[in-house]
Amino acid sequence: MTAKKFVYLFNEVQEAEKYAGSWDGVRGLLGGKGANLADMTRIGVPVPPFFTVTTEACNAFLEAGNKFPDGMWDQMMEGLKEVEKASGKKFGDPKNPLLVSCRSGAKMSMPGMMDTVLNIGLNDETARGMVELTKNDRFVYDAYRRLIGMFGSVVLEIDDEAFEEVLDSVKKAKGVTADTDLKAEDLKELVEKLKAVIKREKGFDFPQEPLEQMRLATEAVFKSWNGKRAVDYRNAAGIAHDLGTAVNIVTMVFGNLGWNSGTGVAFTRDPSTGEKVMYGDYLLNAQGEDVVAGIRNTEKIQNLTKELPQAYKEFLEITDRLELHYRDMQDVEFTIENGKLWMLQTRAGKRTAKAAVKMAVDMVNESLITREEAILRVTPDQVDTLLHPQFDEKEKEQAAKAGRQFGKGVNASPGAAVGQVYFDADTAEKRAKADKQDVIMVRPFTKPDDVHGMLAARGILTSEGGATSHAAVVARQFGVPCVVGASEIRIDQERRQMEANGIVVKEGDWISVDGTTGQVFLGNIPTISPKLEEQTDLLTLLSWADEICATPNIRQAPAGWPTKGLQVWANADYPADARRARSYGAVGIGLCRTEHMFFEQVRLPIVQRMILAETSAERTAALNELLPHQRKDFEGLFEAMDGYPVIIRLIDPPLHEFMPDEEALFEEVITMRVKGESAGLAEKENLLANIRQMHESNPMMGLRGVRLSIYMPEIVEMQVRAIFEAAANQANKGVEVKPEVMIPLTGTVKELDWIQPRLQVIAKTVMQEKGVTFEYKFGTMIEIPRACVTANEIAKVAEFFSFGTNDLTQMTFGYSRDDAERNFLVKYVEEGILPTNPFQTLDREGVGRMMDIAVKDGRQARIDLEVGICGEHGGDPASIEFCHLVGNNYVSCSPFRVPIARLAAAHSALKYRPGGVDILEDK
Ligand code: ADP
Ligand code: MG
Ligand code: MG
């Protein structure tokens, strides 16, 4: 029986592809690091010989209770032979020793797993052999002491500090401060002392046998897949737990052989601005981790052209090739050994939102990627980031250089927050509200009774908890920037201060919290508020997104009705909002709430008079006074939306919302009575009696929406007249108007049967009076479950549907939003009863199913039924995707979210375009 193939050699990437079926499969099998090392080898990039032990071996090892699967070790030995052949050295041979590194590497790059161990294969004997060979005993014993330190802490899990203490004591005894000042003799002495630490802590000697070193290191990498930090990270990032990690055994190349050698890391473009310039650091005469560890001051990568011109030239050629090959910006690690360049890693580089947009657009212009790919390279969240105030990257870098980074945690809720630190909710709220301070609330973790402080704060910082902790959930829900689990911070509630890395922050001190990256800084870091019109790359990308959405949505097209991708409309009540919406790219208004117009100071008394009218004539008189105001509002709206549809919703809230507060009025009446004031008392008493009569036990489910229109039709008759007079006036001025009248809260088609024809008569009458005709629609909001399940009837009367998903969510779940968010939703999300807040991200199974029924049945009755959404979900990317799947024509959201929605709509269209995602899949 032949055992399964658990080991792939540097030149076996084809075999891996055949077995795994796709490049994604190879990445799964060999891990991202291993797959790309093999891929680089295939295209002729110099990579030191290596082999990879598969993730399948890792999973088998873990399943068997930490036992290598049958055949795996033998295959490693065979692989080692091939690596020896290719490198011309022999593992464990004192005359010509091969040294290797043992590197973990999962499919996704993942902090929290085992660190790399360098220089495996060194022992007392091979060390002596290498000294003979290199004539450089300082180099050899430096490598050896590093191996023992790394092996001890990483593989044998001895506390780092035990090794650092020894290093410090040796340095002190020799009177030096830098590691590099230690002489060969000192390092030899250090080696012995480090060995003694292992003996003391573990009771056994540092393994001298090279194969034993390799075996233990491999086991440790496998085990680290289930280490606590790795598991926590996967939970937070939503990475599957059954992927496993691969192990890469890579021939060591040495950047610390002298001034003709070096090591470095680089990005092929600037990861913070996106500019096409090589961005990186290197150190001559240094090994692997030195660059990242920051022990010595690194050089800018461009300087390498002076120091090792030949190697740098080759480096530029190779990185150019890698960009072309992977068609993306690369993050590479390299080492130069005696002038010879070796590549040790390449992967798609992480980037800021700004850089992501610039690179995507640049790469299209360079013909490196397609427009579709460019769109998929940027996430809606990144667009969101670009439109919010954010920290000035340069200032942040400077702060970090100046040692002002105080801590780092999980980036739980994006955005930049600057403020003064307070350690309890009451004080935080008081300082924010009474003293108008910018507050950052800091707690070890938060509880439901901290919420008032969190809402008053500009930002939230906790030292415990992860991405689904109470603090994180609340912060995201309310859009407060938040960093959680900054575990190096110690909070001292008693002394009202916190401490990290030896720095103390007291109550009232200023800090800056970056919820986008998880960083926390001392002091006040300046923020910048970006303007959309200045972001030309983003505008270009969004225009490409709109092109995608203008193509047919084949998936959802019922026979005879080819819908397109989603359009993005905006919710706007005032002309100024409409103009902003247009400048952000909205191509319609999905919701104009008319009641806002009633609340304005001059109008409210007229509205109240209208409500309290005892006769129809009195009411009509008041309404006639309101009419010109409403008409003027609508005229502005139509003008701003020249050529685009405008959906105006007829009055929706219960009438008591327009009346004075009952309790305050009651107090007034009592006071007047007590003081014996009679002037005006009778009117006030009458008003109070009226308000009391209007009292409902559950107003949100009472006399409102279409019910109110049927009960008191004069109001909506006036509104419809105002809408059509405004539209006609603008049409006569040459504006292209497309009014759509929306009736809220329909539950049965009979309601529409009753009200809609009366309103349609008014529309026709006005057009006749004004001698003009234009397109218009009458339709309804769909926000009651009964409307969804009787959509086939409703669509016979309504010409469009607009999902009011706030109410639809409340009524489908039977939750009142305010009560739910205040009381139990956070607990529900924490306990996993709900995956997220359904008022933020549409609940596909329940509310979504209601929508699906409504769209399908509605279009049965009316094939060209226009369908949209105007609830807050219309600006949420995951909900937008669902709207695409359901076959909406548009989503409507707040003007500020329009750019985010445009990109999300294009993502949905691409993702679900037949064949769309597969042909675009990334290497
Ligand atoms: P990480 O995932 O933390 O980046 P790596 O496995 O890439 O870990 O290794 C960490 C450091 O060690 C990197 O700087 C890398 O270049 C260096 N390194 C790893 N393997 C070798 C090797 N065979 N020869 C020289 N340096 C190496
Ligand atoms: Mg690592
Ligand atoms: Mg690396």
Image (cartoon, grey):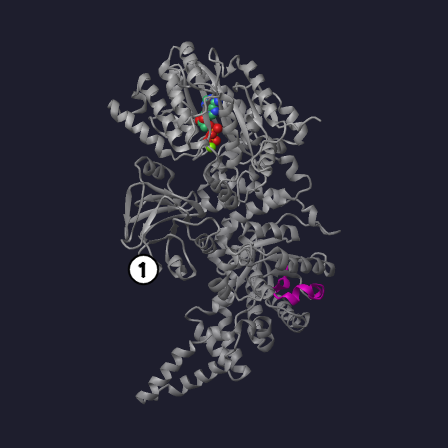
Q: Is residue 882 magenta?
A: no
Mark 1 crowd level (few <14, some 14–19, many ≥20, 10 Å Cα) = some
Q: Observer-nearest residue: 762 or 757?
A: 757
User: In the rendered view of the protein, which quadrant contains the C terminus?
Assistant: top right
Depth check: give the residue in front, 323 or 482.
482
25 lies above or below 818? above
Can the viewer see residue 349 in this picture? yes
Name the quadrant containing residue 763: bottom right
User: Can you give x and y, in whole percent of width and height, for residue 253 in the image?
Assistant: 46, 18
Q: Label 1 is placed on what type of residue?
A: Thr
The residue segment tinted magenta is 771-796
- The answer to whether any part of residue 267 appears in the image is no
Q: Position of residue 434 (x, y in %)?
A: 30, 62
Instruction: Specify whether residue 778 is painted magenta.
Output: yes
- Per the image, the residue denoted by label 1 is 427
Q: Quadrant of residue 306?
A: top left
Left or right placement of residue 71 versus residue 383 in this view: right
Residue 410 picture location, percent across and down:
44, 45
Q: Residue furthest front?
A: 203
Q: Is residue 335 left or right of residue 42?
A: left
563 above or below 185? below
Provide residue 91's location: percent of width, then percent of height.
Answer: 51, 17
Name the residue at the right extreme. Answer: 559
On the rendered image, what quadrant is the N terminus found in? top right
Q: Secondary structure at mark 1?
A: helix
Q: Is mark 1 within 8 Å of ligand 2?
A: no
Depth order, front residue of 20/201: 201
User: Which of these two is toward me, 921 or 461?
Assistant: 461
Q: Residue furthest left?
A: 175
- Identity of the residue drawn at 48% across and 21% down: 209
